[in-house]
Amino acid sequence: MNKFKKVLKEINKHKNFLITSHINPEGDSIGSQLAFLYLLKVMGKNARILNSGKPGPKYKFLPNSKKILTKINKDTRYDAICFLDCADIKRIGGIYEVIDLSKPKINIDHHLSNKRFGNVNLIDSRASSTAEILYILFKEAKVKINKETAICLYTAILTDTGSFNYSNVTSFTHKVVSHLIDAGVDTNNIYKKVYEEISPSAMRLLGSALSTLKLSPNKRIAWMQITKDMLKKCGAGLGEQENFINFPRSIKGVKIAILFTEIAPGKIKVNLRSNDDIDVNEIASHFGGGGHRKASGCTIKGSLAEAKKKVLSEIKIAPFAFPNGAYTKCRI
Ligand code: 5GP
Ligand code: MN
């Protein structure tokens, strides 16, 4: 039995579901959860989406985004939990303490670092997004993708592929997108909603972050930082820095880009991007995080200076795997 059929078989065993994803949900996690909610509904199931936080304002246009709950009653019944776009069970955030994790778990994801914590695991790290995997699941289930679901899946793929530019894009990604457009997606409208409704405070924060840009002597590593003070001065909130990492990443010759954000006193969020075939998932995993080969993240306890020192020295010594199996060391 193929992996998709195994998931459908597991779904068919139960009636009531919880759907969840990682903390600080972005396009793929929100879009995939909403699409999955629809799939379960068509399959005759009861389902609720429960996340540790609400979607950011720019994703509110997604149909049914209001159905994403951050709290449930203690007596809410669920027979199984579906994890979407969530590499590690602890990444679900605060609800980890609230939900009954002894229930059967269905784990659908495309992260290289996925810990396969489900009773059923549908993981494909070559897929551009969790949404791309869901598209195949819809086909296997013979469920027609309606316009609202197409909008969710399209937005998920758009955001996880950097508008179809990253190396995770294949001809299959474009085939999926073509079908989603045929289902009625207004691509121009979604582009505007996702990328052209930047708040003035986020724009100020970008300017401020760019002014902290540093390069290693050989210009292969670029990093920036965001302090609590910068957030306050710009009137910006955490989460408004999504995509800032693309600026240092796009500097000529840069192989690794890093953004250090002080999310709380003594707590630093680290976003990592790799331009070449350097595996930043390895670096993030070293600090208890994870992600993909070319995009990963972790949280480090300590000051900004300490986090920078730790990450930069890890980059210096980490053996990086190239797709052909060769290893190299990146000299700063
Ligand atoms: P971003 O830099 O856009 O927040 O995340 C890039 C990728 O790394 C995403 O796939 C995201 O899920 C993953 N990621 C970011 N932070 C963490 C983390 O702290 N732990 C794990 N396991 N993955 C992370
Ligand atoms: Mn994803």
Image (tube, rainbow, N blue to C red):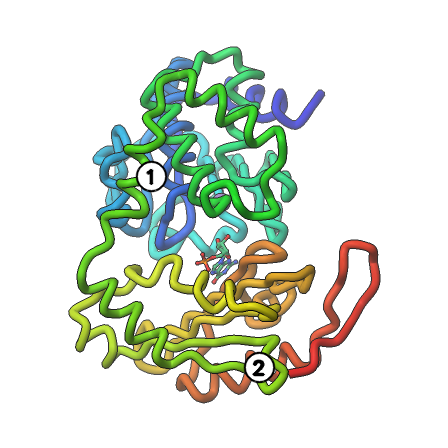
Q: Where is residue 320 in the image (x, y as percent from the top left)?
A: 73, 68
Q: Residue at image x 50%, y 44%?
A: 161
In the rendered image, the residue lying farthest to the front is 252
Q: Residue at image x 60%, y 61%?
A: 275
Residue at the spot of label 1:
191
Q: Nearer the viewer, residue 126 or 301?
A: 126
Q: Quadrant of residue 100?
A: top left
**SS at circle 2:** helix
Rendered-image quadrant of the C terminus: bottom right
Number of other residues with Cα within 10 Å of mark 1, as a class: few under 14, some 14 to 19, many 20 or more: some
Q: Which of 324 and 139 is in front in this view?
A: 324
Is residue 97 shown to the viewer in this render? Answer: no
* Disc number lying in front (2 or 1): 1
In the rendered image, the vertical position of residue 102 relative to residue 272, given as above or below: above
Q: Where is residue 264 in the image (x, y as percent from the top left)?
A: 30, 75
Q: Residue at image x 24%, y 45%?
A: 71
Q: Nearer the viewer, residue 12 or 276?
A: 276
Number of other residues with Cα within 10 Å of mark 2, as a class: few under 14, some 14 to 19, many 20 or more: some
Q: What residue type is labelled 1?
A: Tyr
Q: Position of residue 51 (x, y in %)?
A: 33, 45
**SS at circle 1:** helix
Residue at the spot of label 2:
312
Q: Residue at image x 57%, y 43%?
A: 110
Q: Which of 312 and 4 is in front in this view?
A: 312
User: How far is disc 2 from disc 1 in space, using C-alphas?
Assistant: 35 Å
